[in-house]
Structures are given as structure tokens and as C-alpha cells.
Amino acid sequence: MSAKGQQANVNLDYNPQKDTEGLIPFSAPLNSPEVHDDHTVTFRLKAPEAKEVKLTGALRTALGKGREQIPFNKGDDGIWILTVGPLEPDMYAYHFNVDGMQICDPSNTVAAFTAMPPYSQLVVHGDSPAYYDARNVPHGNVTRHIYHSNVTKGERELYVYTPPGYDPDKKYPVLYLVGGSGELPSNWIYDGRANLILDNLLAEGKAVPMLIAIPNNQVIHRNHPKHVELTFDIFEKELRNHVIPLVDKSYSTIESSKGRAISGLSMGGRHTMFIGFRSLDLFASFGVLSAGDTNAETSIAYFLNDPKVNDKVEYLFIGQGAEEANGFMGARCVALHEALNNHNIKHEYYVGGLGGHDWSTWRHLLYYRFLPNLWRNK
């Protein structure tokens, strides 16, 4: 398979980077990143006046560099070059650091936009479509809703995935899927590939048909020092007053806790804990992705000490990536897992994938564990 060149954005298939003519993307100054047949990758940046250029971002985890930035070499033509890898097929986020300033790769046509400054995306394909790729299978639809919130006093957005063959005469369970600190609802679609992952699972017979509702859980400015904690009460009101009523009114849903799940990554995982665990009238299934609390015995005591909690909860999943399990993020997950064990609360704890605290992990957790077990793990 030839995988030279940049992403062409022609098809949503597993090999949009294939460019055997070596063409440079329209309006781009250079070919960067260039993915070679052996899955090594070359980055280029034309910056003749720069003193130093380094590679940074989540890609460093896959390269075994931790938080270390990787230096480029400067050519006589003023073009900085770095070749890394080989890399496992996956999607990787990265930046360039130019004399201390963090920038996107100006030649890369694929960027991710969040509630934070954007970053570049590197896509390394394998010899067949990945589990998160658009395959030739039946596809669901993603609808963007705009609604007025009396909670945040403004217009907000909500994405809803309906499965292939959605039938308004049938009742469907709903997964409320939320992002991390600084994410937008669209990130679960474009970075998390949640819709394509569920399309593929449904085609493989590995998941039940469900709706996925992706609200915006950013209700406090990202730069506020306590933005996560301050969101708990506000976002719970948003869910109760606007998000869930809108979904139940617009779609054919199971309007009970047994038909609702909530899951999220990082900050969204803490929303799952601190909103979901105290809202057992709303939700009976939970997915805590790359989150937890080292003080779980105290912070969720109301949940841990509920004598009927195992009767109220259908499925509780805690998961994290292999490369984040050894740090502070991992300690939070482990503490939650141990607290649940101490109180004999049924749950699944899983560490897997090759990623750190990044989308490589969260895509993996969705496909390999969480979505296949939702409303099937009795």
C-alpha cells in the first residue's frame, strides 16, 4: 500500500492520504506530514529565521517520549525536517514549537478545533480500514440542534446520532456522551469518531441500536481555575431542563433511567461521576473514561453507601489508556475502582490501547469495551 503525501479530503475511506503523485496540498507551502510506506512520518516547516523547531503534542506518547519535545534539523534552504516512527496506524494530535511559540503545522490540511486553540491531526493508515474509519456499511445520521438555554442564558448546540434504519415507531436507549475540559460537542464526532465507531459495531452485530446525544458540557469559561467543579450543578440543570427534554421530544426514546446512559472523557468522566451518580432517576448506565477521584470514598459517599445501588445501576464502566495509567490521571481511575470494590459495587475496570490521555484512548475504549456492553451486560 502506498501512503505517501498529505490527506486529500476526497473520500472518507481508510486511505485519504494516498497520493502517489506526491502532490502538495492546495495552498500549502510544503508536503507535511508525509507518511511513508513503512509508517515513518516526515514533518517539514519552512522557517529560515527560526532558531529552534520542536515537535510536541499527544503524538509524543506514541513515540515513547512522554512530555519531551523532539527537535527538528534545519536545512540550508531554511526548511526544518523531522522524521519519526514507525507509528502504529492511528490518529495523532501534534503541534510545532517554534522558538517557544506553539503553532499548528501550516502545511497540514487536517486540524482539530476545540474550545482551545486548534491542533494538527496526523492520520497513519493500516492495510485495511480501522474500527473508527468510514467503512462501506450502513451509516447513521448526525443532526445538530440549536436551542435556547434558560440555564446559561443563550443559544447552545447539541449533536444527536440516530442509527441506520432509525424507526420512529420503535423506542431507543440514549447515550449522553460528553467531552473533556475544552472540548466541543463536535469533537466526539470529528476526533472521537463516535458515529463511525457505532456504525461499524452495529454492522458487526456487536452493539444494540441506540441514539447518542452529545451536549456541550462547557458551561464555565475554560480558564476559570475551578471551571470543572463549578460546572457540576449548572450542567445538571442543563441536562434536566433542556437537553434530555429536547431529545425525548424530538426522538423516539426510552424515557426512563434504564434507557439512559451517561459517559464522558476526563472532565466529562467527572461529570459522569458527580452528576450521573447523584442522578439515578435519570441514568442507570455509566462510562467513566480517563477520570476518577483520589478522594472517591468521601466525594461520592452518597453513591457508595446507597444500599440499593446495585439494583439501580445496570452497567458501570471505568476505563483508561495504558500509557496514562502510571500517572496522576491513572491514580484517579484506580482510586475510583478501589472505592467501588470496597463497597461491593458491580463495575468493569479496564486498561487498554496504546494511548495516553488523548483521543487514541477514548476511541479505543468506546469500540472495544463500552459501547458493545451498553444495554447488553446483564
Image (tube, rainbow, N blue to C red):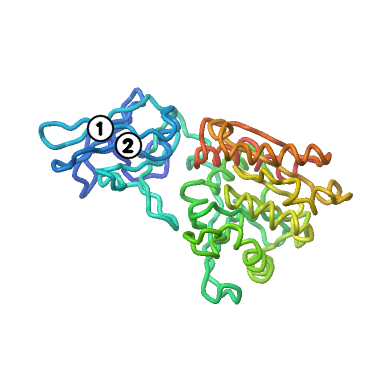
**Helix, strand or loop for disc 2:** strand
Mark 2 = which residue?
A: 55
Q: Earlier in the sequence, mark 2 or mark 1?
A: 2
Image disc number at residue 313: none
Using the image, determine if residue 331 lies above or below residue 223. above
Mark 1 = which residue?
A: 72
Per the model, the C-alpha gap separating discs 2 and 1 is 7 Å
Using the image, determine if residue 177 lies above or below residue 291. below
Q: Residue at point 31% right, 47% down?
A: 102
Outermost residue, left direction?
76
Where residue 153 sits in the image (x, y, percent)? 55, 76
Is residue 342 or residue 171 the one in the foreground?
342
Where residue 334 sits in the image (x, y, percent)? 67, 36
Using the image, determine if residue 157 lies above or below residue 114. below
Q: What kind of residue is marked 2?
A: Leu
Is residue 226 or residue 187 the one in the foreground?
226
Relative to 193, is 248 on the left or the right?
A: right
Label pair 2/1, CB-CB below 8 angstroms? yes
Label 2: how many residues lie within 10 Å, few (<14), some (14-19) or many (20+)?
many
Relative to 129, is 7 on the left or the right?
A: left
Quadrant containing the N terminus in the rendered view: top left
Label 1: how many residues lie within 10 Å, few (<14), some (14-19) or many (20+)?
some
**Helix, strand or loop for disc 1:** loop
Quadrant containing the C terminus in the rendered view: top right
Where residue 300 sits in the image (x, y, percent)? 75, 51
Relative to 155, is 40 on the left or the right?
A: left
Q: Residue at point 55% right, 53% down?
A: 179
Q: What kind of residue is marked 1?
A: Phe
Q: Residue at point 64% right, 61% down?
A: 232
